[in-house]
Amino acid sequence: MAVPARAYLSIGEVLNRLRGDFADITISKIRFLESEGLIEPQRTPSGYRKFTSSDLERLRYVLLAQRDQYLPLKVIKDNLDAIDRGLEPAAVGGVAPPNIGLATIDGEMAPSSFGEVSEMRLSREELLKNSGLKEEHLVELEGYGLIAPRGRHYDGDALAIAKAVTEMGGFGIEARHLRSFKSAADREIGLIEQVITPLTRQKSAESKARAEEVQKEIASLSIRLHAALVRGGLNRLR
């Protein structure tokens, strides 16, 4: 979906928003940081820079890191790369790194969250470090098909699964006990595919968009149904 025109800021507007906190900021400084690869604003057809709110916060992060922590640009760039990959470097000057979470409605996953593709890119070592998993446990989870890399990296879904498994391990639940979760998920995915296949076979953009919405809605409903069934079953044990 195209971003509305006024969602963008000109370089002059960015300058005005930053001057209150950074009196020495100039257009030349912003252009320099761009040339160093720390920001990448889009361009209009005529070549003017278009900054988003994310670009603005990225600039603020860079300027705070320089001013308050005297970090060299290389270190700042490494921190930004970590943020881009979904990791969490230390907060800089009160600016916390972005939180990675799931959209929820009343504690349940919102339909929109099922349409999101994780941009997180973790190495195997980063996945282990951020989840608390041991190497042998990850090997076991991969053997059961619960976790798999996407290409050469692991994404946010893999991290979410790894963290959940780690926490469940504290209750004595092992990877072999979780195979039923994978089987149940595969059956739910198969049911969703069955419903949306007639829509995906149509070539129109409207049908494709409708298929995506139906997929999100059914996925969300399946989670609600699963949660209600588990909750109801546990209530009967009381």
Image (tube, rainbow, N blue to C red):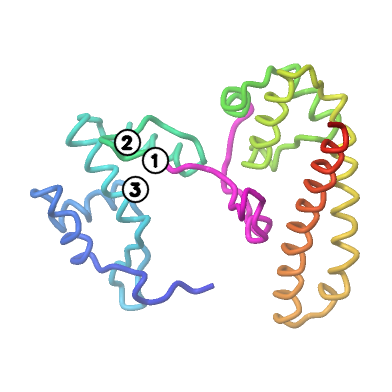
* Amino acid found under the numbered disc labelled 1: Leu
* Magenta stretch: includes residue 107: yes
Kind of element beneath mark 3: loop
- Which quarter of the figure is the N terminus placed in? bottom right
- Could you tell me residue 234's position as x and y percent? 83, 36
Q: Nearer the viewer, residue 96 or 38?
A: 96
Which residue matches tag 1?
80
- Could you tell me residue 195's position as x and y percent? 88, 67
Cβ atoms at labels 2 and 1 below 8 Å apart:
yes
Which residue matches tag 2?
76
Which residue matches tag 3?
37
- Majority secondary structure of magenta residues: loop
Residue placed furthest toward the left: 23
Q: Earlier in the sequence, mark 2 or mark 3?
A: 3
State which region is magenta.
98-124
**Label 1: few (<14), some (14–19) or many (≥20) C-alpha neighbours in 10 Å:** many
Q: CA distance from mark 2 to mark 3?
A: 11 Å
